[in-house]
Amino acid sequence: MVEFNKMYVMLPVMFAARKLDGEDPDTIFYLRIAYGVVQGVIILLVLYTYIQATSAAAKGKSTTIYVPPAPSPFADPNAKKKYQKVEYESYVINQARSLLGSTLFGICLTAGLHYYRGMVMGLAMQAVMAPFNVAENHLVKALVMGKGIAPENRVFEEKVEGELTEEDEIVDAQGNALGTGNAAGDASRSITAADAKGDTDKPFEEVLLDTWDDGAKADLGGLMDRITKENCNFKTKESGWTPLMILSGLGGVKGSGSAIRQVMELGGNPAMVDGEGWNALHWAAFHGSVEGAKALKEQSSLLTVKDIKDGKTPLMHAKAEGNDEVAKILQEMEDSVAAGEKGTDKDDGLRKRK
């Protein structure tokens, strides 16, 4: 299918607009009417697209895709095709916001130039070309003229990880190469590590969740670079996870124990609980994190806390999951607490006898 070239419309319109009499009141009046009607329809269309896109994205599940960046006019036609790793739902929302913002900005700019500078050519150009520009938008085409924005419809000409080839190049948000498509798994981890270090200014919650998703291959350095006194007790919106919970559950990651202690030194509270009533020690116990259990060994008050869902203490979870080494550490903690309580009772008795 031959792609329509807007230049065939834009150039004649541009030449015709230059012939307009910008001093004639009737010409100006009709141009304003035409521009106002067209832009009014476009605003309604864009608002509809924005509402539908954000609503659909909010209901969807997180899906990782690889999208081609915006084309560059001076790009090498023989270069490998570039793709950037994104989460589908967040990408849809960003594209919807971008569409709304650029539309409103364009209207304000054209109207401002006409009002303050008396320019009429912009009104004529936008009255004709604006519908073409909006019709080219991926979201408008999908929601107004297509089948919707479900990932399987490939609205953004995206690929999923298994479809990438050696001819595809993975890049970050700045266009820096991170690997080729045949190594998408490694490239994906590289992108995540770069994001976690703040290279793409990702929200802290995304960095936190990406670190957890990476599991044993997580790069804790990137996350630790982002943790401060202000966000060390941050809780994720959906499940209420904190940095200490994430770190306590990543037992197989080198440096997790040290990271836990650093966060607690910043003011991180291991007693905070998530949506299911789990504290940091529950996380370490359930996920078999020996490093996490050792780092939290002095937090004996966490031992007796039972979660909301199953009513289990950390030790119960460790035993139920067969995490014997963690269970041994927690049992020693309980025994130590019990011994301390007995010693206190004995001392109290001696004091009374005195």
Image (cartoon, grey):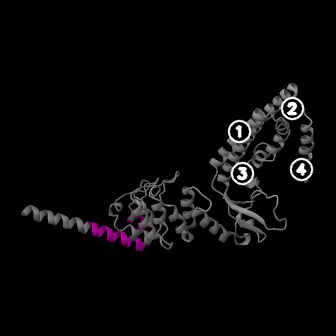
Res. 333 image quadrant? bottom left
Q: Which residue is mark 3?
A: 150
Q: Residues within 10 Å of mark 3 (few under 14, many from 20)?
A: some
Q: Residues within 10 Å of mark 4 (few under 14, many from 20)?
A: few
Q: Nearer the viewer, mark 4 or mark 3?
A: 4
Q: CA distance from mark 1 to mark 2?
A: 32 Å
Q: Which residue is mark 4?
A: 5
Of labels 1 and 4, earlier in sequence is 4
Q: Are marks 1 and 4 in contact (CB under 8 Å)?
A: no
**Image coords of residue 108 (percent x, y):** 73, 38
- Residue 47's mark? 1
**Image coords of residue 74 (percent x, y):** 82, 61
Q: Nearer the viewer, mark 1 or mark 2?
A: 2
Q: CA distance from mark 1 to mark 3?
A: 19 Å
Task: Please state the extent of the stretch shown in magenta in the rendering.
Answer: 315-337
Q: Are marks 1 and 3 in contact (CB under 8 Å)?
A: no
